[in-house]
């Protein structure tokens, strides 16, 4: 059994409670997930596991495979205009095998549009090397527009689906997409012990929960997915109606690279290849980064999902980032301010933070299932590099699941303090379930956090000199260290979906 506490015992802190097993070869269940578990289950200490079964395209459905609307052959030279015209026409755009040189950028801004290759022999080569700072080669969706707003009149607890609203100009209908949010007030910040630390979003309204309305009775609205955190009138919560979310868009079945001259890659921060924003029921399937010369695959980032809901990223791989330095680089699979995003059967290697939640409140209900991460490296430009783990990076990601996955570098959910413009507490109520590898799990979450079933991984729930666990008490629940292979069920996500009839 690898150390849970490590050097902290040297400074007089007591060890966290670790639920150990008498025989790790015997199948076992978590004390927090009994055979008769239901979404309302809570133990005597107030601990509970959220229902993660809503994640992914249409709540976990397999994305469709519609017939092509138009088929294109790779031209000689720049293919940007040819592909963009086809995307603007709509439907499924099929790219035949070949090398597609794309010197500009592409946009999918209409619903029901898919960019599909013919498999690994369809190779997209993005060559743009200037003007992409904080940008991307392909944009899917558009910045969300809000049609109207109504205050939430009463406190709403976590796991609730019904709320009382004030007057909403323009009205609401069943089936409307909405987002619930609140102001990051001084009281909210103080309640989390983050006064003087959180600052990037202070005094602004932030989106927390992207949802769809399923019922309306007078002023009472019912939403499709339970809340992952409470909405308190103290923080001036409100509901905003989302207008015209871009839906049923996807990319699939091709290889790609956007690697450029190394000096050009190092000169730009946060360049992603694919950026989803303001979408619902969207997907990435069977896309894989490659190198044309045996070297790097991507400039900095790979797939980023922002202010979106119900997105599936599956059967894909991204690796070998050129820029793994500070400033937001080397984030291969990234999610921001989004809900119910499913990363399934994805491999990430040789980035900085291979799988990452980043920048802003509101990431919740997301699932990382059967993913693998290796070679994460944080480069400082002076030749003294450190291990870069996958991680929750900024502003309290709440109630997400990392399961049945392998981390040979690691995964961290800690209090990052003043780093990254006051990242502070980066997570609460998140679950590691049946994870393995040769790296480290650092679970130092605000309030409750859970590590249930591991194999091979070092598990840390506190560290020396409060470098990651300051203010995170109670220390996170750890159960079944080095017994993940006999944890039942192996997949919490799949089990919860079956209980919900999905």
Image (cartoon, rainbow, N blue to C red):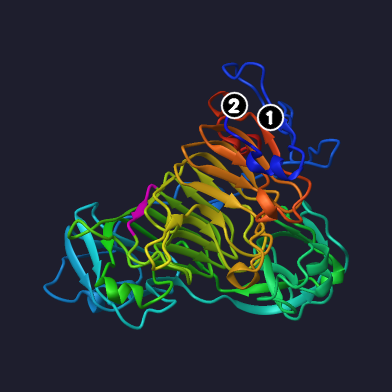
| Residue name at image x 29 percent, y 67 percent | 258
> Looking at the image, can residue 272 be seen?
yes
Mark 1 Cα shell of 10 Å, populated few (<14), some (14-19), many (≥20): some
Q: Where 223 falls versus 126 (above or below)?
A: above
Residue 490 position in % (x across, y down)? 55, 30
Q: Is residue 21 left or right of residue 112?
A: right
Residue 502 visible in the displayed image: no
Marks 1/2 in contact by CB < 8 Å: the verdict is: yes
Residue 90 pos. (x, y %): 36, 70
Q: How many marks?
A: 2
**Relative horizontal placement of residue 17, taking residue 25 as reference (left or right):** right
Residue 393 position, x and y percent, is 58, 61
Magenta region: which residues?
315-320
Residue at the front extreme of this rendering: 10
Alpha carbons under labels 1 and 2: distance apart:
8 Å
Crowd class of label 2 (few under 14; some 14 to 19; many from 20; radius 10 Å)? many
Task: Give the secondary structure at mark 1.
Answer: loop
Q: Which residue is mark 2?
A: 487
Asked which quadrant contains residue 20, the reply is top right
**317 in the magenta segment:** yes
Q: Is residue 335 above or below residue 22?
A: below
Where is residue 260? Give x, y as percent.
Answer: 25, 71
Residue under the point 32% across and 77% down? 105
**Closer to the camera in the image, 149 or 398:** 398
- SS at mark 2? loop
Rendered image quadrant of residue 4: top right
Q: Which residue is mark 1?
A: 30
Residue 158 against residue 240 in the figure, above or below: above
- State the residue lying farthest toward the bottom: 131
Q: Is residue 165 above or below residue 404?
A: below
Foreground of the two, 479 or 215: 479
């Amino acid at each position: 059994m690898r150390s849970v506490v490590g050097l902290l015992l040297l400074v007089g802190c007591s060890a966290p409670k670790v639920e150990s097993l008498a025989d790790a070869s015997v199948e076992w269940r978590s004390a927090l997930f009994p055979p008769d578990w239901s979404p309302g289950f809570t133990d005597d200490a107030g601990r509970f596991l959220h229902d993660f079964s809503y994640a992914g395209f249409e709540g976990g459905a397999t994305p469709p495979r519609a017939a092509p609307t138009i088929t294109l052959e790779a031209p000689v030279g720049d293919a940007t205009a040819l592909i963009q015209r086809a995307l603007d026409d709509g439907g499924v755009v099929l790219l035949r095998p070949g090398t597609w040189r794309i010197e500009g950028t592409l946009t999918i801004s209409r619903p029901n549009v898919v960019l599909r290759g013919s498999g690994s022999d369809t190779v997209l080569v993005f060559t743009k090397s200037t003007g992409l700072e904080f940008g991307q080669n392909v944009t899917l969706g558009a910045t969300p527009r809000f049609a109207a707003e109504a205050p939430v009149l009463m406190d709403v607890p976590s796991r609730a689906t019904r709320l009382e609203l004030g007057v909403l100009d323009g009205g609401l209908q069943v089936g409307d997409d909405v987002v619930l949010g609140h102001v990051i007030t001084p009281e909210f910040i103080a309640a989390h012990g983050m006064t003087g630390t959180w600052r990037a979003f202070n005094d602004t309204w932030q989106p927390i929960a992207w949802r769809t309305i399923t019922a309306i009775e007078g002023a009472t609205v019912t939403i499709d997915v339970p809340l992952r955190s409470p909405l308190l009138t103290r923080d001036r919560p409100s509901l905003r109606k989302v207008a015209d979310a871009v839906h049923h868009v996807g990319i699939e079945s091709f290889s790609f690279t956007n690697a450029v001259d190394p000096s050009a890659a190092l000169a730009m921060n946060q360049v992603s290849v694919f950026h989803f924003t303001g979408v619902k029921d969207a997907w990435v399937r069977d896309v894989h980064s490659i190198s044309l010369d045996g070297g790097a695959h991507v400039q900095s980032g790979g797939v980023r999902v922002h202010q979106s809901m119900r997105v599936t990223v599956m059967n894909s791989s991204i690796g070998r980032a050129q820029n793994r330095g500070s400033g937001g680089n080397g984030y291969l699979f990234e999610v921001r301010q989004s809900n119910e995003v499913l990363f399934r059967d994805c491999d990430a290697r040789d980035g900085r933070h291979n799988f990452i939640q980043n920048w802003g409140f509101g990431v919740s209900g997301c699932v990382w299932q059967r993913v693998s991460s290796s070679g994460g490296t944080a480069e400082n430009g002076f030749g003294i590099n450190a291990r870069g783990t996958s991680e929750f990076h900024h502003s309290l990601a709440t109630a997400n699941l990392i399961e049945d996955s392998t981390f040979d570098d690691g995964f961290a959910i800690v209090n990052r303090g003043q780093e990254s413009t006051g990242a502070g507490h980066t997570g609460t109520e998140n679950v590691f379930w049946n994870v393995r590898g040769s790296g480290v799990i650092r679970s130092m979450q605000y309030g409750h956090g859970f590590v249930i079933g591991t194999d091979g991984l070092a598990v840390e729930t506190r560290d020396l000199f409060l470098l990651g666990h300051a203010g995170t008490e109670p220390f996170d629940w750890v159960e079944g260290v080095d017994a993940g292979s006999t944890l039942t069920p192996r997949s919490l996500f799949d089990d919860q979906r079956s209980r919900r009839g999905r």
